[in-house]
Amino acid sequence: MDYYEPMDFSQRFWRAALVSVITAAAWPAHAQPGTSEPPASSSAEDRDGAASAALNAELFYELLLGEMTTRAGDPALGYNLILDAARRSGDAQLYRRATDIALQARSGESALAAVHAWQQALPQSRDANRYLLRILVALNRIEDSAAPLRRELAQSSTREKISAIRSLPMLYARAGDKALAARIVREALQGELSHPAVGPTAWTSLGRMYLAADDRGDALEAAGNALAQDPEDDGAAMLAVQLLEAGVTQAEPLLARYLGGEPAPEVRMSYARVLIESQRLNDALTQVQAVTRDHPDLAQAWLIQATLQLQANRLDEAESSLQRFTEQQSTLTDNEQRKQAMNQAYLMHAQIAEKRGDLAKAQGWLARIEDASELLAVQSRRASLLARQGRLAEARALIRATPTHDAEGERLKMQAEVQLLREAGHYREAYELQGKLVALSPQDDDLVYDQAMLAEKAKRPRDMERLLRSIIARKPDHHHALNALGFTLADRGVRLQEAKALITKALELAPQDPFITDSLGWVEFRLGHHQEALTILERAFDIRRDAEIAAHLGEVLWHLGQRERALAIWREGLSIDKDNVTLRDTIKRLGAHP
């Protein structure tokens, strides 16, 4: 057929209906392979093509049949009919529809054939190029994706370019060879890296791709370049946080200038989370306090601030933060999320009251929690209150009577009972019960580590060493096990060089961990290097105000003749945790009176 006949009213009516069918049947943009970025809105090319494609009856029938067969479960026939109609009409929408049918049917090669036909018919089509790029990446043909990627960037405005570059890490997230994907993207972005507006985004996207490829060196360099070009770039700062989370400590200085400006609260909170995981609770609290100061309407920040203050035994401040959190929650609609948040606040209020010795008030806070999902946590706190009143048997019975619905619930009950025995000082019983937990999951290093710590408390050093060495044999980079084994050797004054080697390795794996730093200071003290020990322990105490670190630091000061300062450190340690066994034993052993 060499020409198109004008449509009568009936044809126009059915064409409109067909367009409606096609639109309704089209594959959702967010489901396109390899990306969450929706395709661009219909371009002038689409509108012109649609206007010029005067459908005659034969073509209309072919389109209708194609849609009907696709919906009836025969996408292969529907694809062929729609693609044939696209070739005959030159209509961009029909090429897109044929491609979408193939993608819906998970036929990547058919989708690729449709896109190639689309490009041949409409060589300047940006939408066809975008589809080609995404399909090639989805098919893991990473090398072939370079050309359409370069074309897309070349045809984009600065604003479009920034948006497209920002989506590249997600686009290539499923690439089989992530190092190759990073190289292809780096080559395509070469001309953009120094662009004042585009450069920071380009470096940040590259950095994320390098990190996904486990190329931490290039990821760090990319983050540094991005922040050098724009010290206030939120995305680059978040990349630095992600690098910290991956153990790249050199990324931390990159954040300093950014945090000195007007940082996004999301970045500060993410940074605080990394600091919490590294046991740098004072630094984490500083970041969270900055968020509550600059963004006092962020309720979750107040709750996290209260948690950190409670851990630091700053009870009045924790209570004040909880009050601010509660005030904000009272304005929200009562829903499941709000109930869970309030339950956390009630539990923390109960802990504060318990620390103050007001057990009746603690019970009152616990009574406010009605959520069944929090039952074990509530019963554990109630059991703790009973144990503090000397009613340990009742406390254990309360935990054991808590109903559960599966094996995981039973495991959590056993863990709660172990914690109860630990808090009550019944270390041998806690050790034996923890052994039952380990027997259920013998490869769970966290459970084995906890049993090792209880073995030490139960005066079973050989068991402790055996358990820790079993963890290290399975996971040589388990820095907690390395540190614990090194510290216990140092504390017993045996095999001090081996102890130092273990602790040094642990500190290489977690350079900012205050407890590992404390262990290194303690082994230096045991080796007779008192001045070196003092420097290291002061650094540990600066990172984390902790009663046990205070015990060690005070003892070194005591032996160096700085007794007034030692007494001051011990007094501070007692204010943090007046019941800390190590601190109290140290003071008693040295005959001090802080």
Image: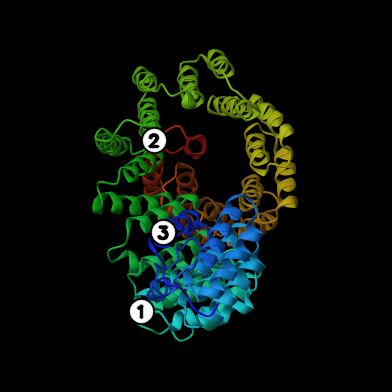
Badge 3 is on which residue? 10
Image coords of residue 171 (percent x, y)? 53, 67
**Label 3 amino acid?**
Ser
Q: Position of residue 151 (x, y in %)?
A: 49, 82
Residue at 63% in and 57% down: 75
Q: Name the foreground residue: 563 vs 308.
A: 308
N-terminal label among 2 and 1: 1
Q: Name the residue under label 2.
A: 337
Q: Residues within 10 Å of mark 1 (few under 14, many from 20)?
A: some
| Separation of residues labelled 2 and 1 (CA atoms) | 41 Å
Give the left or right position of residue 576, taking residue 533 as reference: left
Dot 3: what SS? Answer: helix
Q: Is residue 95 above or below residue 501?
A: below
In front: label 3 or label 2: 3
* Viewer-side label of 1, 3: 3
Of residues 288 and 451, the one nearer the viewer is: 288
In the image shown, does 102 or 176 lie closer to the viewer?
102
How far apart, in angstroms, are the residues tagged by discs 3 and 2? 55 Å
Residue 158 - label: 1
Q: Which of marks 1 and 3 is nearer the N terminus?
A: 3
Q: Is residue 426 above or below residue 191?
A: above
Would you place residue 182 above or below residue 19 in this image? below
Mark 2, Cα crowd under 10 Å, few <14 / some 14-19 / many 20+, is few
Residue 380 in the image: x percent, y percent?
Answer: 50, 24
Q: Position of residue 572 (x, y in %)?
A: 37, 43
Q: What residue type is labelled 2?
A: Gln
Amino acid under disc 1: Thr
